[in-house]
Amino acid sequence: MPTPIHYSTSEASPTRGFVYVATGKKYVDEAALSAESLRRFHPEPICLITNASTDHTVFDQVIIQDHLPNTVASKLAMDACPYDRFVFLDSDTYIVAPLDELFQLLDVFDIGVPPALGGFHYDLPGVSPAFREPMTNVIAMRRSPALMNFFEKWRQYFSEYESIMGREWDQRSFRHAAYETEQLRITFLGDEWSLSPYPGGLLCRDVRIFHGRPRELLYEMEKMVNGRLGYRVFWRGFGCIYEPYKMQPIEHLQVLARSLVQSTKASLRPLRRAMASR
């Protein structure tokens, strides 16, 4: 990996901060939007790792790696940030509340990461099926010998799976590396820390981070899921479904109506495809 070039708007390199990895103007601009949503709640420094200079002032540190690939593989450069404890955020995240509890986790754990919905449909050699596949869009990390070993294994398995499967697979390689890294303390986060419109999530508290595109959809989701708290399931097309005994009769009817609409759409989809192929 090439030696990073640093330029910074701050004098010191603090031990706690946030990091984005983005290449190309489109994704750097997207990361800047996410960082602006983060800045509303956090004074900590924000680092951008990229392959070209940028004029965005929301980033306190910019690390330029000239040969950073314009693919998901660039994500593995996140550990080049200058912080002892850091939270990596994908460029398409939208932060709506403070994230201090993620740093609190790092008093005990090396990694905090949300689980993926999938990851149970395939086997990895030596990895228990009970160990879930992680998402890699929000990751809290603290530097330790175990974390250094983890990154070494993650890069190793990322390269191996790319060679074997013909595609980049950051989550599968992360899962394999995390399971095999000795003394690595990892915990999984709730859906409140990375709620995506696809497929949704099971919620209890207020959602802190929304993830996905387009950004306008995330704004709509924030109003929908954080307007009323409690045990609830968010599923796009249905909205929030609460515990039955806490729902009003009209809300039950609304859920039923949405279910009929979604079922009808699903039933008509094969017919539309068949007609389009004629």
Image: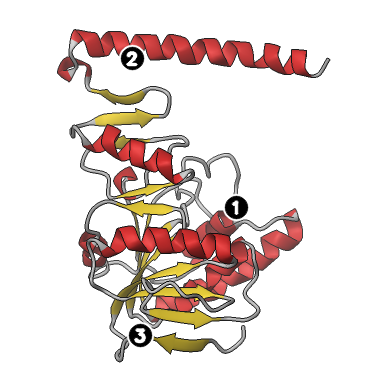
Scheme of image coloration: secondary structure
Q: CA distance from mark 1 to mark 2?
A: 39 Å
Question: Callout 2: 10 Å neighbours few (<14), some, many (20+)?
Answer: some
Query: Label 3 near label 2: C-beta < 8 Å?
Result: no
User: Which residue in the structure is indicated by mark 3?
Assistant: 9
Expressed as whole percent of the image width and height from the top left, the position of residue 72 reads: 60, 61
Please give the name of the residue rendered at 39% of the width and 86% of the height, measured from the top-left corner: 8
Image position of 114 with respect to 57: above or below: above
**Which secondary structure, mark 2?**
helix
User: Which residue in the structure is indicated by mark 1?
Assistant: 124
Q: Quadrant of residue 31?
A: bottom left
Give the amino acid type for the residue marked by disc 3 in the picture.
Thr
Q: Judge whether residue 196 can be spotted in this image.
A: no
In this rendering, the label closer to the viewer, 2 or 3: 3
Expressed as whole percent of the image width and height from the top left, the position of residue 220 reads: 35, 36
Left/right of residue 4 with respect to residue 222 in the rendered view: right
In this rendering, the label closer to the viewer, 3 or 1: 3
Question: Callout 1: 10 Å neighbours few (<14), some, many (20+)?
Answer: few
The N terminus lies in quadrant: bottom right
Q: Nearer the viewer, residue 58 or 81?
A: 58
> Residue 255: which numbered mark, if any?
2
Q: Earlier in the sequence, mark 3 or mark 1?
A: 3
The C terminus lies in quadrant: top right
In this rendering, the label closer to the viewer, 1 or 2: 2
Expressed as whole percent of the image width and height from the top left, the position of residue 248 reads: 17, 13
Q: Earlier in the sequence, mark 1 or mark 2?
A: 1
Q: Quadrant of residue 138?
A: bottom left
